[in-house]
Amino acid sequence: MQIIDTHLHLYAEEYHADRKALIDAAKHDGVVYMLLPNIDSASIAGLKQLAEDYPHYCLPMMGLHPCYVKENFEEELSIVEKELKTGNYIAVGEIGMDRYWELDHISQQEEALRIQLKWAHELDLPVALHTRNANDEVISILRELNLPGLRGVFHCFSGSPEQAKAMIDLGFYLGIGGVLTYKNGGVDKIVAELPLDHIVLETDGPYLSPVPHRGKRNLPGYILHVAQN
């Protein structure tokens, strides 16, 4: 089996001790590409190092994660814009809105999202969207902006069938990860009704490990558990 991990924070400190071994193991297990979303300015160095060490395998994105949108978000966005203009990134991400972990900067999150969506459109790049407890808001923003050709992935999909249909109608894929394996998650029932050509797989490592590793560090090779479900 050959598989792509479409969302993995491989630069995270949780992988510092054994990163190379994990990459080698994932390659052996059939993971042919790893797509790496950025978080904020602090994660850029590690992201770029992995892209340099593993060219054509670790593929970097560039964006400002909604949970890292703070009072200085304009400064952070200027760094993102500069990096995107280098042409070294496959997508704009991880961007979006989060109404679960971060409620203090919702208006700034929305502004940052709109700006980065427009950059993606101008650069003809896909986007990786984080929409925790904010599916409807982001769907509404995409409809309002109406940017022709904008495409990408709703990362870590956990919405309703109606939201899934809206996302697909907008031209987006749904990122499915470890939550699929959770007994009471409900994602498995929704995914069973979705067209396979609008689904991509991800780990979101080091987070959201699939069963039987739930609660532990999520490893790149664990994407096989998602695929087998």
Image (cartoon, helix red, strand yellow):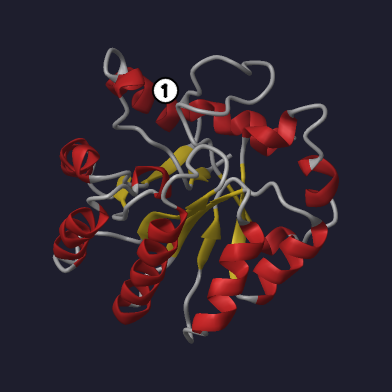
Q: Nearer the viewer, residue 94 or 90?
A: 94
Residue at the image position 66 percent from the left and 67 percent from the top: 167
Q: Position of residue 208 (x, y in %)?
A: 57, 28
Picture quadrant where residue 142 is located: bottom right
On screen, residue 79 above or below 172: above
Query: What count of labels does the image hold?
Result: 1
Q: Which residue is identified by label 1?
A: 25
Above or below: residue 122 compared with residue 212: below
- Crowd tier of the residue under label 1, counting other residues whose Cα lies within 10 Å: few below 14, some 14–19, many 20 or above: some
Q: Position of residue 157 (x, y in %)?
A: 64, 49
The N terminus - image quarter: top right
Kind of element beneath mark 1: helix
Residue 158: percent from left, percent from top: 69, 46
Q: In this picture, is 21 found above or below 159?
A: above
152 sits to left or right of 167: left
User: Which of the image's four quarters has the C terminus?
Assistant: top right
The residue that appears at 63% across and 58% down in the rendered structure is: 135
Q: Is residue 179 left or right of residue 195?
A: left
Of residues 222 and 184, the one drawn nearer to the viewer in this rendering: 184
* Vertical relation: 227 (above or below) 6: above
Q: Which three-letter amino acid code belongs to the residue tagged 1?
A: Ala
Instruction: Give the quadrant of residue 110.
Output: bottom left
User: Horizontal and vertical percent for residue 74?
Assistant: 22, 60
- Front-most of residues 28 and 33: 33
Residue in the image at 44% along x and 28% along y: 26
Q: Is residue 111 left or right of residue 151?
A: left
